[in-house]
């Protein structure tokens, strides 16, 4: 605990915050693994490209609809082992079981039942994923309420996510794909074992980090107000910061999922640059610099507030995207190589490093901003509903970003890839070049511009959050004598 002004802040150690972030890393490991599920579904299980991408969209929408119910369940839970810890563990167990079933049995099911089976197991995966990710957003309210400490979540999250996605891409492109001859059954089995094991370890460490924090005295302001499922709409309608954050982050998420889609990565590195393994190697080189930029950005956020850091990083991302477009249309991309460093390679690395750092700040700072919106709800209405607040956000976020797989699938089908997705062996063409540029740069810019507009109406800056925490402190103090 730390007192500043009249507020007694519920703070955590840096170690506790860092370990709690591993809950998000644990689910991101599964998310990274499932980025390749379309290759399993089409290449191993024999399902059609358009059918698979349509299913992925439908499942993402289903994912969104499970969020409000699970958030409501979390907020109603007051068990002896906490409000959040049980669902972190349960979610991770469901994730492991569903992924094993999906990748080891789908191709063995009779052809006429295979698509239905794939949908059912994928639905189970979504339920587990929602349980665990809902706790990442909601449990931050018990971890710390200090506006100057909350940005630390973004620092750890940015570092961990960079390591996961960069090292993961390196292992996929540089080790597993060459070892197994592509996205084969052996590729998915080996990768699955690693993901399940590491994710389980991360979940256990995260549960330990909030063991003493996930207790009733940290569950908001004591209140007799009963929350019902039908209260979701009034909550959304009455919380302007949440509305604006949803618009901003969901358009960013749509852009990011298209940009990070495994098909987009193969089109850029495997086809335009002619070296798919380069995607992993370049990522490893850029990681230290990206992490350094994240440190700088979080220092900025702690001084001036999360909103200011988010807006600044978004503007930087837009500016660097303009430079990337100019680079792609003027440079000979096939000359980019680490074995023969040249000006094109150095410019490409510089632009990717700078944009990676800016994107890391903007993407990861959204999660602690959700905790700010939850505290705003408590400040305004007395309701402590972090589960519902986090899953309201996720519901809309997932509905919008659900269309990323369909956008990629439909757009590549439009330029001729109806039966099979582009691979590293696909020859370069002008339609493929411009489609890659649209996926990698164009769609993200549209998302960032939408974010900048919505942030003009988001008023939870650093000063406002200190005011909110003071008010919540006063509300708790007023209740304590009668408790």
Image (cartoon, rainbow, N blue to C red):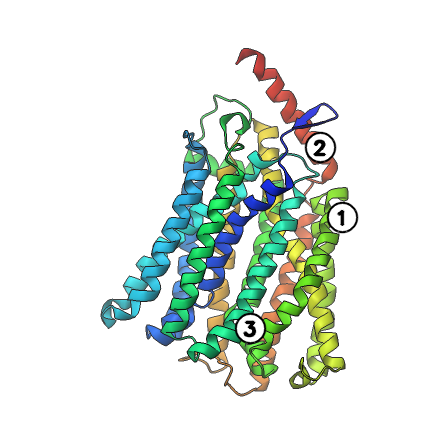
- Counting other residues with Cα less than 10 Å from the Cα at mark 2, is it few (<14), some (14-19), or many (20 or more)? some
Image: 356 above or below 174: above
Name the residue rendered at 26%, 70% in the picture.
Answer: 108
Q: Where is mark 3, residue-wise?
A: 265
Q: Position of residue 123 (x, y in %)?
A: 35, 55
Q: Where is mark 2, residue-wise?
A: 466
Left or right: where does residue 214 sit relative to residue 445?
Answer: left
Left or right: where does residue 168 sit relative to residue 186?
Answer: right
- Give the CA separation, mark 3 to mark 2: 42 Å
Name the residue rendered at 57%, 67% in the picture.
Answer: 259
Q: On residue 300, which mark appears?
A: 1
User: Mark 1 or mark 2, which is nearer the start of the sequence?
Assistant: 1
User: Mark 3 or mark 1, which is nearer the start of the sequence?
Assistant: 3
- Counting other residues with Cα less than 10 Å from the Cα at mark 3, is it few (<14), some (14-19), or many (20 or more)? many
- Nearer the observer, 68 or 339: 339
Mark 1 lies on a secondary structure that is helix
Mark 2 lies on a secondary structure that is helix
Q: Position of residue 339 (x, y in %)?
A: 67, 83
- Nearer the observer, 175 or 165: 175
Image: 377 above or below 38: above
């Amino acid at each position: 605990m730390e007192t500043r002004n009249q507020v007694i802040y519920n703070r955590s150690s840096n170690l506790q915050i860092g370990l709690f972030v591993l809950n998000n890393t644990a689910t991101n490991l599964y998310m990274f693994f499932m980025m390749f599920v379309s290759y399993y579904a089409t290449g191993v299980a024999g399902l059609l490209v358009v059918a698979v991408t349509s299913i992925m969209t439908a499942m993402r929408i289903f994912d969104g609809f499970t969020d409000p119910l699970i958030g409501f369940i979390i907020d109603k839970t007051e068990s002896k082992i906490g409000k959040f810890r049980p669902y972190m563990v349960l979610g991770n167990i469901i994730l492991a079981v569903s992924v094993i079933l999906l990748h080891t049995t789908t191709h063995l099911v009779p052809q006429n039942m295979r698509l239905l089976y794939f949908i059912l197991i994928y639905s189970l995966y979504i339920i587990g994923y929602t349980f665990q990710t809902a706790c990442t957003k909601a449990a931050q309210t018990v971890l710390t309420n200090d506006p100057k400490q909350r940005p630390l979540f973004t620092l750890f999250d940015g570092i961990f996510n960079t390591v996961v996605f960069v090292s993961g891409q390196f292992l996929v492109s540089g080790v597993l794909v060459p070892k197994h001859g592509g996205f084969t059954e052996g590729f998915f089995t080996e990768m699955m074992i690693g993901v399940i094991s590491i994710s389980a370890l991360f979940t256990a460490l995260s549960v330990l980090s909030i063991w003493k924090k996930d207790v009733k005295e940290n569950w908001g302001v004591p209140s007799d107000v009963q929350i019902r499922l039908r209260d979701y709409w009034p909550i959304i309608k009455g919380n302007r910061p949440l509305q604006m954050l949803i618009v901003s982050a969901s358009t960013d998420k749509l852009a990011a999922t298209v940009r990070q889609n495994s098909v987009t990565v193969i089109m850029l590195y495997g086809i335009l640059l002619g070296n798919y393994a380069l995607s992993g190697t370049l990522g490893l080189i850029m990681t230290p610099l990206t992490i350094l930029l994240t440190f700088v950005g979080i220092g900025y956020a702690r001084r001036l507030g999360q909103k200011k850091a988010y807006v600044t990083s978004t503007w930087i991302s837009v500016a660097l995207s303009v430079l990337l477009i100019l680079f792609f249309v003027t440079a000979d991309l096939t000359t980019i190589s680490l074995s023969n460093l040249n000006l094109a390679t150095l410019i490409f690395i510089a632009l990717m490093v700078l944009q990676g750092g800016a994107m890391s700040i903007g993407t990861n700072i959204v999660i602690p901003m959700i905790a700010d919106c939850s505290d705003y709800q408590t400040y305004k209405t007395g309701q402590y509903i972090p589960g519902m607040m986090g899953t309201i956000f996720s519901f809309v976020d997932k509905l919008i970003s659900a269309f990323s797989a369909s956008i990629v699938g439909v757009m590549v089908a439009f330029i001729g890839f109806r039966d099979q997705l582009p691979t590293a062996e696909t020859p370069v063409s002008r339609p493929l070049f411009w489609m890659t540029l649209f996926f990698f740069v164009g769609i993200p810019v549209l998302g960032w511009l939408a974010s900048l507009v919505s942030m003009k109406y988001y008023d939870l800056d650093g000063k406002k959050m200190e005011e909110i925490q003071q008010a919540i402190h006063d509300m708790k103090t007023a209740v304590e004598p009668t408790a």
